Amino acid sequence: MKRLSILFLMALPSIAHANPTISKGEYVFRASDCGACHTAPNGKELAGGVKFPTPLGNIYSTNITPDKTNGIGDWNYNDFVRAVRKGVGKGGRHLYPAMPYPSYVKLSDEDMRALYDYLMNDVKPQAVPNRPSDISWPLSIRWPISVWNAMYTENKRFQPRADQSEQWNRGAYLVQGPGHCGTCHTPRGYGMQEKSFDEQKGSYLSGAQLAGWYAPSLRNLPFSKQETIDLLKKGRSEHKALAGPMDEVVSESTQYLTDQDLDAIATYLADIDGNHHAASAVTQANTRQAKAQNNGEFMYMRYCSTCHGMDGKGNSHVIPPLQGNLTVNSEDPLTLVRVILEGGKTPVTQDHLPYSMPGYQWVLTNKDTADVINYIRTNWGNHAHALTPEDIQNTKDIIKKN
């Protein structure tokens, strides 16, 4: 996750370093969330090895430490810029677009230089060889990626909008560029490309299914800016909590952003169209009121009510309410099903320990799961379409593939 003044139309924004605990370069590194993708579980810091499943096979992130043999220690600044902005490594080898270079192309020159200097001077070299992909020949040939890039990416730097405030543009820069939020929250086309890269198109940040999770729409978030700031800073707020892949985003990236930058992001997401209107819940016209209340209510009272309350209101700053919850009311219930079955945990941050929710896959049948979800999605003012046991099994199949 994520300046302009009188030179508004001439200057590109860069990340204003106002965090006294870290350097400018590390601040850009944190805002760009590099550590989450380039440090494998139990692996050496930034030595790569994180697995990314693709339809063609698994690929693995690379070593970005200044080790001259295995990392980027022998890359000059132009090599680095070409890789980060265009997805072409030293020697002309194309990077797989799991690397979010379609977003990083928007980084300012100042931020790019600071990031390069940080990686080269402040990161410990790690003599860890890069792991080759599991994609077999001839699908492993890289040159077709250049065709994909020409068809599906926009080689455009960030341009502030003259009709928006400095704060709004700052948030737009952080979200579109270093934060690369669209990588998960923007739906993808037939070529697995992001359908859009900024708010000019309605598909941008409109919600997407990726890697066994559903990332909800971020357009014109229907809750307060302070809720957004708290979620990005702490992983939870008075009424909401994050889990799943966002856990890593908060712990590795957004908790380190300044309050000013978090406020800018919240400003942009609350008013992404430049004409704020609260997003409505899923329309009742698309709602099927599944009143399998007996079993659904029984399951809720047995497994959920102790924490979330009889009325679904939760506990401020600890247990998120289910009433009006974006995940509960989402058109795509993948994340909701996954949290109920597998459990969830809020992020670990510098100032807060996580809260955990247990998973119930061991005790709930597909019918039980559907019934309790339908109870939650049709009570306390929630209006989301009903699920069937077959929907639950299909979701389990999606999770298993990822």
Image (cartoon, helix red, strand yellow):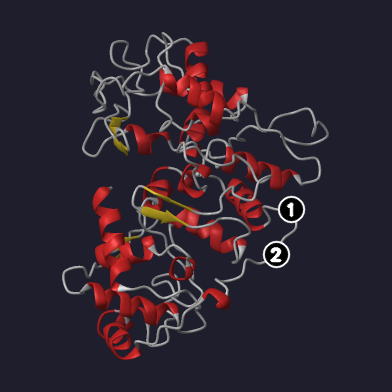
> Where residue 314 sits in the image (x, y, percent)?
41, 78
Dividing the picture into quadrants, the one containing residue 3 is top right
**Residue 90 vertical position relative to residue 373 in the rendered view, above or below:** above
Residue located beneath label 2 in the image = 277
> Where residue 177 sits in the image (x, y, percent)?
57, 36
**Residue at image location 40% in from the left, 27% down from the top:** 96
Q: Amino acid at mark 1?
A: Gly
Q: Would you say the residues marked 1 and 2 are in contact, meaning their CB atoms lie under 8 Å apart?
A: no
Seen as rendered, the residue at the extreme right is 6
Kind of element beneath mark 1:
loop
Q: CA distance from mark 1 to mark 2?
A: 9 Å
Q: Between 230 and 161, which is closer to the camera in this rendering?
A: 161
Residue located beneath label 1 in the image = 274
Looking at the image, can residue 156 be seen? Answer: yes
> Where residue 356 sits in the image (x, y, percent)?
29, 65
**Residue at image location 44% in from the left, 66% down from the top:** 327
| Label 2 Cα neighbours within 10 Å, binned few <14 / some 14-19 / many ≥20 | some
